[in-house]
Amino acid sequence: MLIYAKQPINYIIQNHPSKIKTLYLAKEMDKKEYSRLMKIGFEIKRIPADAAGKMCKNASHQGILAEVDEYVLHNYKAFLNYEFVLVLSGLTDVGNIGAIIRSAYALGVDGVVACGVKSLPLEAIVRTSTGALFDMPFAIEQNVHDVLNDLKMSGFTTYGADMGAQDIRDVKIKQKRALFLGGEGEGLTQRVSSKLDEVVSIKMSHEFDSLNVSVAGAILMDRMRK
């Protein structure tokens, strides 16, 4: 897969250099930094800026691109032995998904399952997660109800986010827990919400419609940490 822009590539260089096949540079680089990169072991190619633009369909590449190993999806059933699982039900925006994965990794989530979709553009999610996807077990399972049932059968207490529900601060969080976040527009469906053990919300200090799903998810993940 092709990754571009400074932040995700720097993260991969620092944490997963063996995944890089070829690093493409479309700008001048400090000689010391270039020498350091040459010693890591992957191939480095200098290319014209217009060639870099064609490679990433004229997206903002910031002069650096990398061909890296494909991300290998996990089977969500491997997550049934974890303690903290995040389930994304119907989310499709790769910016939100990437931000959520970045927060999930930072806040101690053990695995993330995306439901309601057959596939997702993993290249874009690597980029929008600033490379954190490579450190977060991630699965795709189309049927959210199968995931919900398997989690409950495996001893998870299931929590879902919904405006107007009880304040997350008033809920005693169990050790083995799964947080469900709904899609950007509709949130969790009634069918999913009705099967959850607890439905929670973030109490606002001022009247406000809602928080972006990635922001709300980060707050809930933090408050569910052990």
Image (spheres, grey):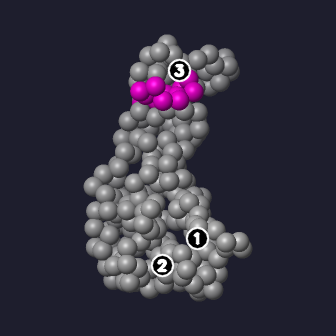
Determine which residue is flagged by label 1. Answer: 220
Indicate which disc residue 159 carries. Answer: 2
Identity of the residue furthest to the right in this view:
205
User: Residue 103 placed where, x, y %?
Assistant: 57, 58
Q: Secondary structure at mark 1?
A: helix
Determine whether, in the image, residue 49 is placed left or right of residue 79: right
User: Residue 161 placed where, x, y %?
Assistant: 50, 74
Query: Do the residues bearing badges 1 and 3 touch, measured as CB atoms within 8 Å?
Result: no
Determine which residue is flagged by label 3. Answer: 25
Q: Is residue 59 magenta?
A: yes
Alpha carbon of mark 2 to alpha carbon of mark 3: how far?
45 Å
Determine whether, in the image, residue 57 is placed left or right of residue 46: left
Mark 2 or mark 3: whose residue is earlier in sequence: 3
Say whether residue 134 is visible: no
User: Residue 208 placed where, x, y %?
Assistant: 64, 68
Q: Residues within 10 Å of mark 3 (few under 14, many from 20)?
A: many
Which residues fall within the magenta stretch? 56-67
Q: Secondary structure at mark 2?
A: strand
Mark 2 or mark 1: whose residue is earlier in sequence: 2
Residue type pointed to by label 1: Leu
Q: Secondary structure at mark 3?
A: strand
Q: Is residue 142 magenta?
A: no
User: Residue 23 placed where, x, y %?
Assistant: 48, 26
Q: How many marks?
A: 3
